Image (cartoon, grey):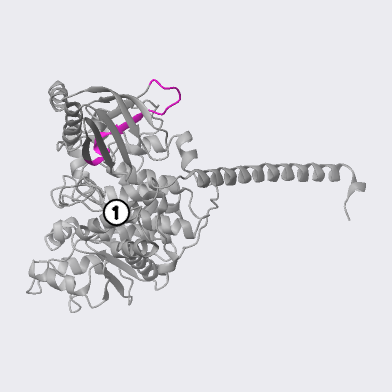
Amino acid sequence: MSTEIMEFAELIKTPRVDGVVLHRPFMPTVEGTLCLTGHHLILSSRQDNTEELWLLHSNIDSIEKRFVGSLGHITVKCKDLRMIQLEITGMEECLNIASSIEALSTLDSVSLMYPFFYRPMFEVIEDGWNSFLPQNAFKDLESMTDEWRLSEVNKDFSLCPSYPPLVAVPKDVDDETLKKVATFRHGGRFPVLSYYHKKNGMVMMRAGQPLTGTNGRRCKEDEKLINATLRPGKRGYIIDTRAINVAQQAKARGGGFELEANYPQWRRIHKAIERYNVLQESLIKLVEACNDQSHSMDRWLSKLEASNWQTNVKEILTTACLAAQCIDREGASVLVHGTEGTDSTLQVTSLAQIILDPGCRTIKGFQSLVEREWLQAGHPFQQRCAQSAFSNSKPRYEAPVFLLFLDCVWQILRQFPCSFEFNESFLVLLFEHAYASQFGTFLGNSAAERARLCLPEKTVSLWSWVNRPQELERLTNPLYEPNSLVIWPSVAPQSLLLWEGVFLRWNRSSKCLDEAYEEMVHIIEYNKELQTKVNSLRRQLAQLETEDPLLHTP
């Protein structure tokens, strides 16, 4: 560790500067001492009751510096879309601070990240690393059906580097078959179980694209695997998250789609969800529109539309509704894939489960969904969340795929405000931690990488923090009433709103909204107290009636 500490020390040209002025949205200006550590930018003040700033370097997306005489201004743009300004007197000091921040916020080595150094100040009651193990989730499945099994075919990650060591597959399909299918699917991602619909026994599977190529290559084992999920005489649906022309073009690169001739019992439907590289551009345009204060109404609306963000939300939600409809209303099984099966595929499979399964709308159930359908399923968080909307470097693999999923969940939460156990704060918290965190949960790009980094032994899980009683209380929706039904969100454009809690969070004060929320919580608590009183009086009355027959009410 000492060599790593040395590495940090070399990057910090000026460890502290006095007399720095800090400007933050909706908070009073603070003057104090700026300190740079290996992982944090800290501004502490001697002024009473001013809140200190502790900013993770990994939360910094980019910085801008300008000078007015010898007074330097550094604007720090964060991955959570916040912007803060530092005023530093002295050109040399300002340049040193700026270059140190730039170096510390762009460290490449994962093992230098803060989660490896963070020590929790809270008692870990439940170790989040053990909260959502695949074998435990499978126990629930076993209680509903005996048609599936857990395969260890990928236990050393050699068959599919982006899959977990345990996957659920049809019982009648052996590991040898799975090995053959893996050679026929992109990235070795053979079809695996994503969701079992208890109501009618239908399933949703996910995979990578089939490697049919220009010659229409086929794989009998692949056909056997997915046909094993069909009921006699029933059809299934393949939902391809690419437009038909994109899927056609993939053939030239060795990819492709399932040909009708080889999959006669499956109907293929193409839905055009944008690829990850297009989404990053969409986020950048949206955030720019939200931060531009010089707008006329026309300009704001046209910029919002030009970002295409709401269109992306609509496409993803529409596809998830389609998958849910096939399963619940058509009584058919579904296979979802795009190209790699690690981005749009996961958006669709996870949102379909929110629509279909009330368990996913609870706090623990949603954590389990993120764990199963995102972390274990191989969504490359490290690559996708390396930069947010303010980065100056050209995006390589960055994309707000997970943020779009959270936005879609927020849309459904807004339409069904009593059906979710968690509130908007929980979704915002997940967005923040996916991009920068003291916890190890979102580090790495796959289960294999997390195992190699020994994250469960060396870092703390975000779930360990979230599942403490005081934190759960903050993330619980006071309006929640368990709803065991399937919930069908409206995807009409006028039903979909801009997620202000993320995109306008730092642009305008939430004071009035916070006060309204407090008032609502107060009313609900008061209502519960009255309900308890009523029940108690009813019991007393019943007691009196049994003791004195003359008291019987007519």
The residue at which mark 1 appears reads as 288
Q: Position of residue 173 (x, y in %)?
A: 22, 61
Q: Position of residue 121 (x, y in %)?
A: 37, 25
Residue 61 drawn in magenta: yes
**Residue nearest the observer in this picture, 390 or 204:** 390
Q: Residue at x 55, y 50 (%)?
A: 479
Q: Quadrant of residue 529?
A: top right
**Residue nearest the observer in this picture, 517 or 233:** 517
Q: Position of residue 191 (x, y in %)?
A: 23, 61
Image quadrant holding the N terminus, namely top left
**Residue nearest the observer in this picture, 333 or 48:** 48
Q: Position of residue 147 (x, y in %)?
A: 32, 60
Q: Of all residues shown, which one is farthest toward the front?
A: 69
Q: Residue at x 33, y 61 (%)?
A: 304
Q: Residue at x 36, y 61 (%)?
A: 300
Instruction: Mark yes or no: residue 491 visible.
Output: no
Left or right, 301 with reference to 418: left
Instruction: Mark yes or no: residue 306 visible.
Output: yes
Left or right, 433 with reference to 518: left
Q: Quadrant of residue 542?
A: top right
Give the residues drawn in magenta, as a range.
46-63
Left or right, 329 with reference to 178: right
Location of residue 8 with respect to 532 vertically, above or below: above
Secondary structure category for the residue under label 1: helix
